[in-house]
Amino acid sequence: IYITYSHVISVDFVLLSPFFHTHKHIRSTPAWSDACCLNLTRGQLDEDNTYLKSTILHQYLFGYEIPDLIMILLPGGDESSNNNSDNSNNSSLQLHIMGTKKKIAFLQPASDYIEKQKGSNHVIQYYIRNKADSNQENYTTLLNVILSQRKEKKDDDIKEDEKKTENGDDNNDDAKSKVNKIIVGTLMKEIDTEINTTPPNSLVAVWESDQYFRKEENSISLVDCAHGLSHVWSVKDETELDLLKKSSVLSNKLMKHGCIPKLEGIINEDQSIKHEDLAQALDTMIEDPSAINLKIPQEDVASCYFPICQSGGTYDFRVSATSNSQKLKYDIIVLSLGARYQYYCSNITRTFLVDPPKAVSNNYELLLAMQDECRKAMRPGKPLKTVYKTAQKYLERQKRDDLLDKLPKNLGFAMGLEFRDSNLTLTAKNPTPFKVGMVFTLSCVLQNLELTAPQKLRIPKDSAVRQIDTYGLQIADMITIGDGGGEILTKLRKQVTDISYTINDEEDEDEIQADAALARKLAQEPDSNRALSSNTRSGVRASSRLAKHTDPKDINDGAAMREKKQISLMKRRNEERLQELARKSNASGSNNENDKPEELVTYRSSKHYPDHVSVPNQVKVDMEKQCVILPICGNPVPFHISTIKNVVLPDPDNRASYLRINFYTAGMAVGKDAPVNTAKLVAKYAPYATFIREMTFRSLDPHTLTSAYRQITNLRKKMRLRELREQEEANLVQQERLVRTKNERVPRLSDLTMRPVFAGRKTQGNLEAHSNGLRFISTRSEIVDVMYNNIKYSIFQPCENEIMVLIHFHLKNPIMVGKKRQKDVQFFTEVVDASQTVDNNKRSMYDPDEMDDEQRERQLRKKLNAAFRDFCKKVDAVAKKNGYPDIEFDVPYRDLGFTGNPHKEMVFVQPTLNCLVNLTETPFFVVDLADIDHVHFERVTYMSKAFDIVLVRKDFTKPVQRIDMIDNSDRDAIQDWLTDMEITYTAGPMNLNWKQIIQTVAQDERFYMDTEEDEVTAKEAGWDFLRMYGHEDDEDVDEDEDDSGYSDPGAVAGEEDDDDAEATSESEEEDFDSDEDESDEYGDADEELEEQGMDWEDMERQAMRDDRATRRPDSQQNVEDDMYRKRRRGGSAPAPAPQKRQRANVQKARAQHQQQQQRKIARGGPAGRRNRR
């Protein structure tokens, strides 16, 4: 211990020596006030004031506070220093120390250490207290040491002082007395206090009395040296910086793991607590860090000040502020605390917003940005006043001049052993420059802000924020000055999403009240009717989308308006698609080089054949060159393995075995398993080349052909696997490397499950948000990185009626997860185990255990939803901070969702802002609405209970996507949503052959145009041909609806040829005849309708709709014929369809229609209603 302290003393001599240099331009600096020596005394211990300059000096030099000690520090050259041969060395120092015997013995190793150092001119002289003569000899010796400094003062210095006095430079009375007096620096704020508080017989009290040090005859002039001492210890060495960093980390952890959980617990439990009681709890936590599981020796930790807790609209942002006795309000809460670690201080302040209005959040974000600007301005060499001016300029730049008078007088101060150095404050006038190694607390404040009534409108009624009219915001952090500027030491997150809380959520209360009302209602109903009351009413199933009272007239008007919007939308989308295709054609015109095949080269000449080919008339396989060498007319001929379609080893006969090899040839389907390059080669050489289709070899040695068959098969498998892997990785885009966040807290979600999984195993781990992307680390150390610039859509789906809460990322470019390419990555947590969700053994709703389970599940859902939502906000903030503003999480619109079958099971499909998704079941169903060209509704009839949706993509090379078995009650809502999203749709009664339709559309260059190639003949543009009712038919109905429900059948068919028109007319006449026959047999249809409650007007509308459906094509072939006729009019079709085939299709459609009508009649349906008309 002694050696350590002696080293500290010797090092600090070097720090103090420049300020006592004999050059006047150094000694006369304002920091030291021309002092030629220092009188540094420390009286009795004062536990109430731990930040006295004398106390800080002892801690700085010795590491301990030594009371009743006198130290005189002056430059070298004193006569009493006989051991210094060179008294002219101005860099040496003399330190004279007077104290008791034990204290001198404690400090003795310091002088021993200095004597052993070569080239050191420093001297330490000790004076042990002598009770025999009341210590008079020691006092006289110290006084003579100080008076000897008058001889050291040179003549030119005296003349200079006299000149200043004559010229009036020093016009005060004290300046004139300094000419012939010895100027001694001391701690002026403490010298009078020490005399009054220390015992009369103490060393310091006697020394600083009028009897010795302050005796007038001594001509000693006292000046304050506190500013100079502040400069000495303002620049920290590596040891001090390390202690300050540990102290800052301690404050950071106390705020994070102690203060914030304590505050959140109080808010969650709605506790009533006073500010001073909360501050006392925090102070106890600081004094005993083991309360938050910090393993730090308790004797090394102390509180810098009593924690400050403020809320309720009354705020005091001064350092001397205290926590009052008022109760904590859940509005705008400001918490400040500071911890000391081995005497080194740190400070941190955070403002917490509860139910904050938008104006308060905006001001907080402004304050946060202002603090960051001030931190950047703290660079070495710049004056301290730069920070304050930077804050003012930033507010002016943001056009918030109204906040200039809301700034405090200073924005922080230097820290270290002393909590607040009043000489190094960040005011608007402090010229002291920043230096590397300084440490400050940067405290940005906006005080006395007004909260007006309009700003409180959207605040929940029960929020305490409505009760305040003024508020303040404060953020304080520890900053160290490095070569590159200011660096934050207290890295606790302080974004709006990190310090905001919402406790008065009116929606949650409404849901709870609704659940309670429903429970009371069910409790009053009989048990037999409970299951039916919620879903049925008078035997009719009610849709959750419809209002309680829906007017049929309003439904019809809405459908008419929707149809009108769709017609105008179709025209506009056709024009947009024409422009898109034109741009795409121009862009892809120069990319045809990629379609050229690569020629196959195995050997340059026969000289390069392998050695084992020398044996004639044998089938050989070269695995290295990937070719098969076949004997043809005795000559070995190589064939690349990619040209072989398959190889067959037939059963041998009695004499020989056979091997048949089939090749890819022109004139037949190549197949989807064929290599891409081989298919291109076949297409290239098909017009003029001769192909070998098959070769069969016979051998008397069965082993030879069997070995060749096995080698060829293995080689084909390897080539196929390699090609598949290349195709998987062909479209992969090289991702940038993840930049991990180091200087800030990393947002993290723990105990997540990832889908898709690695190698068929459940993948669990943690998800972290870093500077340029997210990283998932599994429990088996598997890593998946998702870059921000590769995320196309981010979706957050809370757990409402699902069993999981999840975050889903739809990527722009696929990434490799395991060995497969994936474009969708999902991270979720299950709220309820899947095994529990299929358990139908429900107990009574009045069972207390059942109610407790439901309550726990509800709380768990709410907690997980809040955790995931908070993580999404943090990811959004991190992405925007690092230059990725496009990251924004969408939440599916559950009220617009519907049940359908996109793959092989019924799932709940929900729309988002940009997609149509089902994320709960696998495989994921994610449809980008920007890629959808058109939507078609299939099986839309009045008899079917469900319909299908076909999503046609803009890229016709990709297959359509389907959602089957959607309930009819959801059709209007889906069509309204599509219209709002400006997506065109049509409807039809049958399922269509979309593969053939898409091929026809892709080949028609004028598909989106409304005229034929002659640009005169009109035709249906785009997807209009799929409409169930044409435009002319709609106009006729609008004009003549009151007169008749019929229209010309030819108008529906369009411009058909004579055979098609005649066949259609005959078909419809036969249909009507059959209707008449059927109506004769079932003449009671009208009576049945009346019994069902339909009036005449409703029956008129129903019959008119049935007539329209009858006149439209009822088979898939009719739609295909329409497409065929369009191609024939455009001249792109090679030849007209055979007439026999058309008549056969018409007869087939007629037979299908008759069977359908008979089935309707057998079921008692409305097929016979048209007989009334």
Image: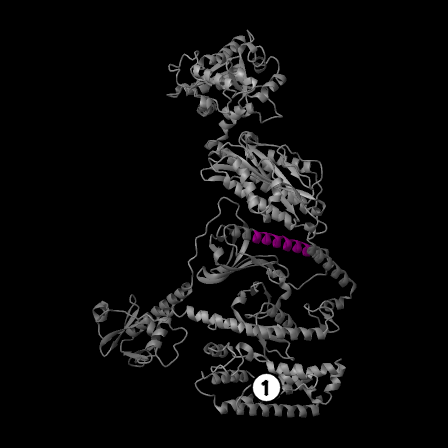
Q: Main secondary structure of the magenta part?
A: helix
In the displayed orientation, state which residue is furthest to the top: 133
Residue 912 visible? The answer is: yes
Front in this rendered view, residue 993 or 1060: 1060
Write down the quadrant of residue 659 in the picture: bottom left
Q: Residue at x 42, y 70 (%)?
A: 586
Q: Is residue 806 above or below residue 641?
A: above
Q: Residues within 10 Å of mark 1 (few under 14, many from 20)?
A: some
Classify the position of the C terminus by image quarter: bottom right
Q: Residue at x 59, y 22 (%)?
A: 189
Residue 14 left/right relative to 714: right
Q: Residue at x 48, y 70 (%)?
A: 580
Write down the quadrant of residue 346 in the picture: top right
Q: Is residue 1085 above or below residue 794?
A: below
Secondary structure state at the residue bearing disc 1: helix
Residue 104, percent across and down? Answer: 50, 16
Front in this rendered view, residue 1000 or 1018: 1018
Residue 648 visible? The answer is: no
Q: Is residue 572 above or below residue 172?
A: below
Residue 614 left/right relative to 597: left
Residue 52, percent across and down? Answer: 57, 25
Span of residues in magenta: 853-873
Q: Which kind of residue does numbered mark 1 sit on?
A: Ala
Q: Which residue is mark 1?
A: 1051
